[in-house]
């Protein structure tokens, strides 16, 4: 086999081989509930953070006992990218609770602020 044929064979093998560094996106679901009715600003991660902190989203939302807030996004690494949700612009505490779900499993729950930074997935 000539040098050109070997080079073509190697190139075709490389193109046909599956990429080992393929990233798998994880589904992240954020949930915030409260005991009292209140309009709040909710901040949460929607993409891998950049140097200028892009990748964070916020929205104003009326939340209450019968009106929880939920959002779903995908992240390549919810633990490394620090998936989080926080509630801001409140003047009194109506007992906010938050949950972070990764691929359908409850990854964390807390009060007022939830973050997966420094946490490890539970198997």
Image (cartoon, helix red, strand yellow):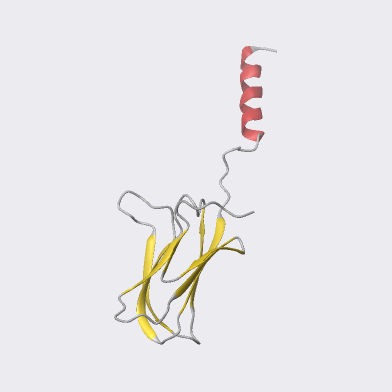
- The foreground one among 32 and 71 is 32
Extreme residue in the right direction:
1
**Image x and y of residue 54, in percent:** 35, 56
**Image x and y of residue 30, in percent:** 50, 68
Give the answer, above or below, for where 57 lies relative to 54. Answer: below
**Image x and y of residue 3, in percent:** 62, 13
User: Which residue sits at x=57%, y=39%?
Assistant: 21
Quarter holding residue 117:
bottom left
- The foreground one among 112 and 86 is 112
Q: In which quarter of the image is the N terminus?
A: top right
- The foreground one among 22 and 4 is 22
**For this view, does 55 lie left or right of residue 103?**
left
Give the answer, above or below, for where 7 lies relative to 102. Answer: above
User: Which residue sits at x=49%, y=80%?
Assistant: 68
Quarter holding residue 37:
bottom left
User: Which residue sits at x=66%, y=23%?
Assistant: 9
Quarter holding residue 85:
bottom left
Q: In which quarter of the image is the C terminus?
A: bottom right
């Amino acid at each position: 086999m000539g040098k050109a044929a070997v080079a073509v064979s190697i190139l075709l093998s490389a193109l046909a081989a599956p990429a080992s560094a393929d990233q798998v996106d994880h589904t992240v679901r954020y949930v915030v509930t409260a005991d009292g009715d209140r309009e709040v600003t909710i901040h949460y991660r929607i993409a891998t953070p950049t140097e200028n902190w892009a990748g964070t989203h916020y929205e104003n939302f009326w939340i209450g006992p019968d009106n929880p807030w939920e959002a779903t996004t995908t992240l390549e690494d919810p633990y490394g990218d620090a998936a989080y949700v926080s509630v801001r612009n409140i003047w009194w505490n109506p007992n906010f609770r938050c949950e972070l779900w990764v691929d359908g499993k409850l990854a964390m729950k807390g009060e007022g602020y939830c973050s997966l930074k420094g946490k490890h997935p539970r198997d």
